């Protein structure tokens, strides 16, 4: 069995436009490949929800970088846990653009189980 996997999920306010987001993703994918981190970034016009997973030290280093990254504000940790399996093992950083009305549920109850959006 390999090193334990650590998974971190957070919500933050988005402080980057579309072109900045594309550049941010390119850099994140290269860095994540080098650091063994995988994950998904959900984004609407004003927020991010991200789940990252990898070795505890690599995820902790990423979390410290995010705290000082001006493209994120008001970071709120939703989950931080050890895991047996990676959920996103093939994704260095997948982007999913989400309608803003779907994030409204996340801001009110960020720990609620995901549910289908009746408007999507």
Image (cartoon, grey):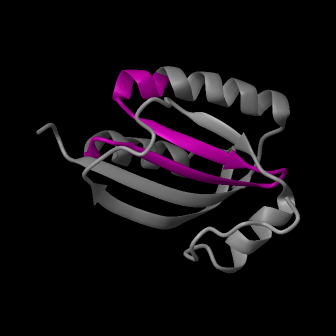
**Residue lying furthest left:** 1
Quarter placement of the C terminus:
bottom right
Give coordinates of residue 97: x percent, y percent: 76, 44
Q: Nearer the viewer, residue 48 or 69?
A: 48
- Which residue occupies the foreground of this view, 23 or 110? 110
Percent coordinates x, y for residue 100 in the rendering = 84, 59
Q: Which residues are magenta?
A: 31-56
Q: Residue at x 38, y 53 (%)?
A: 7
Q: Position of residue 84 (x, y in %)?
A: 25, 51
Q: Is residue 64 left or right of residue 74?
A: left
Residue 25, image quadrant: top right
Image check: 25 left or right of 38? right
Is residue 45 shown in magenta? Answer: yes
Q: Indicate whether 85 appears above or below 29.
A: below
- Quarter of the image containing the N terminus? top left
**Lateral position of residue 33 relative to residue 49, left or right:** left
């Amino acid at each position: 069995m390999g090193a334990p996997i650590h998974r971190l999920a957070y919500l933050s306010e988005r402080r980057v436009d579309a072109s900045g987001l594309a550049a941010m993703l390119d850099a994140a994918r290269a860095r994540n490949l080098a650091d063994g981190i995988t994950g998904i970034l959900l984004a609407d016009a004003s927020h991010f929800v991200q789940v990252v997973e990898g070795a505890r030290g690599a995820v902790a280093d990423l979390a410290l970088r995010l705290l000082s990254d001006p493209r994120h504000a008001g970071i709120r940790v939703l989950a931080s846990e050890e895991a047996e399996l990676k959920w996103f093992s093939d994704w260095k950083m997948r982007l999913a653009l989400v309608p803003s009305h779907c994030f409204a549920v996340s801001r009110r109850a960020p720990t609620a189980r995901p549910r289908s959006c009746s408007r999507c």
